[in-house]
Structures are given as C-alpha cells and as structure tokens.
C-alpha cells in the first residue's frame, strides 16, 4: 500500500508552472491590479482588446403575420402571453426608432450650430479687420498731414535758420573729434 501512495504522489514535472495562490479581489481596484499583473507576467503575449459592442437593433417587423390575433371569443390562455411578447417587442422597436430619430436630430442641430458659430466668427473677424484697416488709414493720413505741415514750416525755418544748422553740424563734428581714440585695435600688430 505504501508503494501505491508513493506512485500517486509523483513529484511535479520539471517544466511545469508553479501553482499560483487563488486571490479573491476585495474591490474593483484590486481586481484591475490583478489583471495587470497577469498581463505583465508575459509582456510578449498580446493583450486581448475586445471589439466595440455593436449597437442594438430590434428585429424587423415580420412582412407577413400568419397567426393574426382576433378579438373573437375562445382565445386560449397562452395567447395572452404571445400578445404580450409581441406588444413588448413592438414597443421596444418604436422606442429604438424614437431614440434614433432624436439622435439624428441632435446631430443635425449640432452641425447647424457649428456652421452658425463659424459664420459668426468670420463676421467678427471681418469687422475687426475693417476696423484695423480704418485705423491704419487714419494713422497714415495723420502722418501725411503732419509731414506736410512740417515741410511747410521747415521751408520757412530753413531760410531763417540755415546758419544755425551749419553751426550745429560743426559742433557735432568737433565732438566726434574730441572722442577718445581706442588705445589698441584688435587684430592688428
């Protein structure tokens, strides 16, 4: 008997994986941490990324209804449940269509609003551009008027003070001559 127990209690294979202790996550964060650890054990293995779930669509209404329910007497007790399921399915389909049309309307409203915002922004930009151009024109006109006034006054002053200007030019030339000459010039020997 001892041989039997030894035979059943074989040591594990040399290449077998170690048994991981079962850890029950206590909250969502711990569950996420465990999943990340499992993914990071073998970084070469590609991570499973689930596809985006498809949008639910109701079954299309049947083209031809074979068992039409009438209001005649004698309907069995099971007919009510059939009617109830058909009604529920039709209400779901109508709700889906309502939500779909509402979503499409919101998308159209959004696009319309975007278009209006762009148009308003372009109008504001155009208005500001015109204002800037107008200010530029005013400045140019003021500058031309000022230059014109100075030219008129300069011609009158030139005749009277031509000797003053010559004196100032001579004084500036003397100041440049009096400036201290550099004691050395780099690059020359």
Image (cartoon, rainbow, N blue to C red):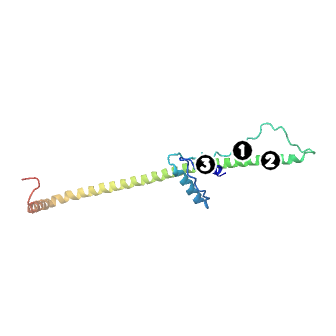
Q: Where is residue 79 in the image (x, y as percent from the top left)?
A: 86, 46
Q: Which mark is residue 58?
A: 1
Dividing the picture into quarters, in which one does residue 144 lie?
A: bottom left
Q: Is residue 69 above or below residue 134?
A: above
Q: In this view, does 166 lie to the left or right of 100?
A: left
Residue at figure coordinates x 20%, y 56% from the top left: 155
Q: Residue 17: x and y, percent?
A: 55, 49
Residue where numbered disc 3 is placed: 107
| Front label number (2 vs 3) | 2
Say whether disc 2 or disc 3 marks the residue closer to the N-terminus. 2
Residue 151 relative to residue 70: left or right: left
Foreground residue, 44 or 124?
A: 44
Q: Which of marks 3 and 1 is in front?
A: 1
> Label 2 vs label 1: CA separation?
13 Å
Depicted 16 relative to depicted 31: above or below? above
Contact, CB < 8 Å: mark 2 with mark 1? Answer: no
- Secondary structure under tag 1 reads loop
Q: Where is residue 189 in the image (x, y as percent from the top left)?
A: 6, 53
Measure the alpha-carbon separation of dots 3 and 1. 22 Å
Give how far apart the Cα atoms at labels 2 and 3 are. Answer: 33 Å
Q: Do the residues labelled 3 and 1 touch (CB within 8 Å)?
A: no
Q: What residue is at 69 percent from the left and 44 percent from the top?
A: 57
Q: Which mark is residue 85?
A: 2
Q: What element carries label 3?
A: helix
């Amino acid at each position: 008997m001892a041989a039997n127990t030894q035979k059943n209690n074989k040591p594990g294979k040399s290449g077998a994986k170690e048994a991981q202790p079962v850890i029950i996550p206590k909250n969502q964060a711990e569950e996420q941490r465990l999943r990340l650890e499992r993914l990071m054990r073998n970084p070469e293995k590609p991570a499973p990324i689930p596809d985006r779930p498809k949008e639910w669509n109701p079954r299309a209404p049947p083209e031809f209804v074979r068992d039409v329910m009438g209001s005649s007497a004698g309907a069995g007790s099971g007919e009510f449940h059939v009617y109830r399921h058909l009604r529920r399915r039709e209400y779901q389909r109508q709700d889906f269509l309502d939500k779909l049309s509402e979503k499409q309307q919101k998308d159209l409203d959004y696009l319309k609003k975007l278009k209006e915002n762009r148009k308003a922004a372009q109008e504001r930009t155009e208005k500001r551009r015109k204002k800037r151009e107008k200010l530029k024109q005013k400045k140019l006109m003021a500058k031309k008027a000022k230059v014109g006034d100075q030219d008129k006054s300069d011609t009158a002053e030139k005749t009277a003070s031509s000797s003053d200007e010559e004196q100032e030019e001579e004084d500036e030339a003397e100041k440049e001559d009096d400036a201290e000459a550099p004691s050395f010039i780099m690059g020359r020997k």
